[in-house]
Amino acid sequence: MRPTSFLVALLLLLAGAGLLVAFDWLPVSVLGVLCLALAALGLLDARRVRALPSPEVARELPAVVPVGVERRVELRLHNVARRSLRLDVHDLHPGDWPVFGLQRHVVLPPGRTLDVAYRVTPAARGAFAFDGCAVRIVSPLRLWRQQRVLPPRQQVRVYPNFAPLAKLALVGAEQASRTVGAHVRRRRGEGTEFQQLRDYRLGDSMRQIDWKASQRTRRLISREYQDERNQRVMLLLDTGRRMLARDGALSHFDHVLNAALMVAYIALRQGDAVGLLASGGDSRYVAPHRGLATIDTLLNTLFDLDARAVATDYLAAATLLGARQPRRSLVLLVTNARDEDIEDLLAAVQLLQKRHLVCVASLREDVLDRLRERAVRTLDDALETAAMAQYLEQRARAHRMLRAQGADVLDVTCAELPAALVEHYLAMKRAARL
């Protein structure tokens, strides 16, 4: 129970009456009557607000929401009392989530239902709870506010942003690849698995012509091939300290997860199997599977996975992956290659290359590109530029050492990562390197 501003104003007026009594401008008996009247009204109003039944509350919010995407939450309030309720409404959402539209003051007529909507942006992945809905009920005489915490309590899981995947589901595999930003030219008829017979087209090679079918139909018929299916893609994700950097509202690891889901979706649409190993901080493993249901498996496994402030043991990760996946695969290792980690990383890549085709995607901080374009005007600018140049040279040296060992290296920002991974996967597949 809390006094309202109206009750505080009445108490101030009563204090003013006490000053009048002190100066003999008002009889003491009148002050006594005023005090008794206000006390009686206060007690009566407190009993009445305590006797009021709580409104019924229902919350409309999916059990699974994507990180960093603003969501509309709707509270449905139903008044079961016989009188109108004046309410201050505040939903008990996770405390560090940005919210717009709370708290709300509403008047709820008897027997009526009112919808109160607000918007919330999940700030991190994982499991979270809405601990109920807090309402402050204003008493009939507006002297008191009583706060009550009402159900429902609701558990919510925050997943990586899967909205782009929902858009890709509406288009074909080739169009989905172009939507991501991958630029891989379609080379008609140069796959390794037979797909269909069709009429001859200008530009088809002679070896594509099916002479028996052409003789039967008395026109040229070509065989069309597709890229070989039933191959494997393994996503090897760094969950160590390198992934704690942030570009925008999300950490590098959040960007990595979004990109991993994107390339996994494209590969599954192509008929390949996709698996995942996260190592460094938190560890998770998903064995390779085919079919788009694998996306649900990945989401359910990775939604609460996060990077930790520890050094990544690349060699241990490569050893574990080699033990669990003996079959040749395209291994997409996503990390931030630094000069001080290069020996361990080279040993890991060398171990993986004995059986797998390895690509190292090295994330570059977006701030580096901005600093590189900035004009140098002060001493601080010059020092920052020199430090940046040294850092970039160390990265470039690490990348050169990886390439010299035969690994493919992608030096990309978080924004470039999804398209680069998809493009590399398609290029390796169509070059028949898997």
Image (cartoon, rainbow, N blue to C red):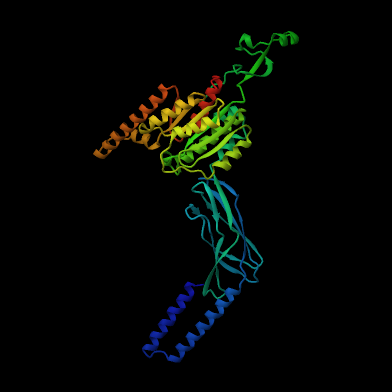
Q: Nearer the viewer, residue 349 or 211?
A: 349
Name the side, left or right, on which 73 lies relative to 348. Answer: right
Can you see residue 181? no
Q: Is residue 18 visible?
A: yes
Question: Which residue sits at x=28%, y=33%?
Answer: 386
- Where does residue 107 sit, x and y in percent of width and height? 58, 66
**For the image shown, how many numbered marks are present on the structure?**
0
Kindly identify the residue that appears in the image at 51 percent across and 60 percent down.
103
Q: Residue at x 43, y 91 (%)?
A: 28
Query: Horizontally, is 270 left or right of 312 in the view?
Result: right
Horizontal arrangement in the rendering, residue 78 relative to residue 408 (left or right): right
The residue closer to the viewer here, 303 or 97, is 303
Name the residue nearer the viewer: 281 or 58.
281
In the figure, residue 105 lies in which quadrant? bottom right
Horizontal and vertical percent position of residue 115: 61, 58
Residue 193 occupies quadrant: top right
- Residue 45 position (above or below residue 337): below
Toward the left, the furthest residue is: 379
- Residue 49's spot in the image, x, y percent? 57, 74
The quarter in which the C terminus is drawn is top right
Q: Position of residue 152 (x, y in %)?
A: 60, 59
Q: Does residue 32 sit above or below 340 in this rendering? A: below
Q: Quadrant of residue 414?
A: top left
> Relative to 50, does residue 17 appear above or below in the rendering?
below
